[in-house]
Image (cartoon, rainbow, N blue to C red):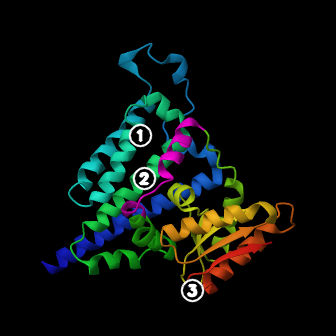
Amino acid sequence: MSNEKLTDHQQKVAEILQAVEAAQQLQDDILKYGLDAAPLYIEDVDGDWWETWGEDEEEQPTFVESAKEIKNRLKALQKEASSIDSNLAKRLDEVNCWVKDVKLGSLTSKKFVMFFLQQMIGDAQIWLDIKAQTSEEERQLYYQQMTAVERYWYSDLFPKWLEQNDSKFLIWKQKLMAGEFSQSDTMLLQSIATEVVRREGTFWQCYIADLSMATDIIVSNKQQNPLCSQITSLSEEFSQEKYDDWKNTLQHWGIERGLFLSYNPNTIDGINQIVNVVLYNSDRLGASVYLKFNL
């Protein structure tokens, strides 16, 4: 019987880690392809559904099921969360209320919204699977098999986002829905992430960390000590106010240290310089230090 339970537990661990890997792959593809990643995750996103909408109600385009499935998954997760984690249930209710009246075709056309919903669904399912474990020891077994940045996100930052007030959430949800979010730094972050991985580091990048926690990318190096980093091309003259807002945001979320890096986009070998600074400080930056660094 004990062997059977062990096998079941190992299977569950494998399923959670597979879900974490899928969440990481979604981040990787968004960074690598930007909006061009949409067809990989959103069915018929570039189809001619606006031209044919309503012409044949019995034969709606296939993307409708995709958008409908996402709405249904959000509702199902909210119901499941209501008996496991009330904070998650509350967040999912916020998201459900945000999208419930958006027509399926319109929702599918909003690629950044769909990306966020898919990230939210993935995070929520992983969190529920972890919370469903009967002991803290079992939960730690899951965390131990994650990378340092994955563990930091699911054991620390994501739970904090569920528990604490997020004054920015309403604002950036509205911007996503209105199409006012461009993610113009995608190519820069993708280059940084690629170089971090090439040097055997790990990274995490998602909408909640970016838009609520002022963190473009979370990076971990050899010491397995994740560092929240904000990368900006603002000059010294204009970056101080942004730095102050950034520091206050990190402290609000209980993030104990961080890197605010200003760089010159015209600098030769700029990516390598950025990665050098990020990885070095991931290993060495002390607690309660919010470093402002200019390249």
Disc on res. 98: 1
Q: Amino acid at mark 1?
A: Trp
Q: Position of residue 31 (x, y in %)?
A: 62, 55
Q: Which residue is mark 3?
A: 223
Q: Amino acid at mark 2?
A: Met
Q: CA distance from mark 3 to mark 2?
A: 29 Å
Q: Amino acid at mark 3?
A: Gln
Q: Position of residue 123 (x, y in %)?
A: 40, 58
Disc on res. 137: none
Q: Assess disc 2: are there few (<14), some (14-19) or many (≥20) residues with their C-alpha within 10 Å of its C-alpha.
A: many
**Magenta-highlighted residues:** 161-179
> Is residue 119 depicted above or below 111 in this figure?
below
Give me the residue at 57% from left, 58% from top.
210
Tell me if I can see residue 152 in this picture.
yes
Between 98 and 108, the one lying in front of the other is 98
Q: Which residue is mark 2?
A: 120
Main secondary structure of the magenta stretch: helix
Q: Position of residue 56 (x, y in %)?
A: 41, 14
Label 1 residue SS: helix
The quadrant holding residue 199 is: bottom right
Disc with the residue nearer the chain's start (3 vs 2): 2
Q: Assess disc 1: are there few (<14), some (14-19) or many (≥20) residues with their C-alpha within 10 Å of its C-alpha.
A: some
Label 2 residue SS: helix
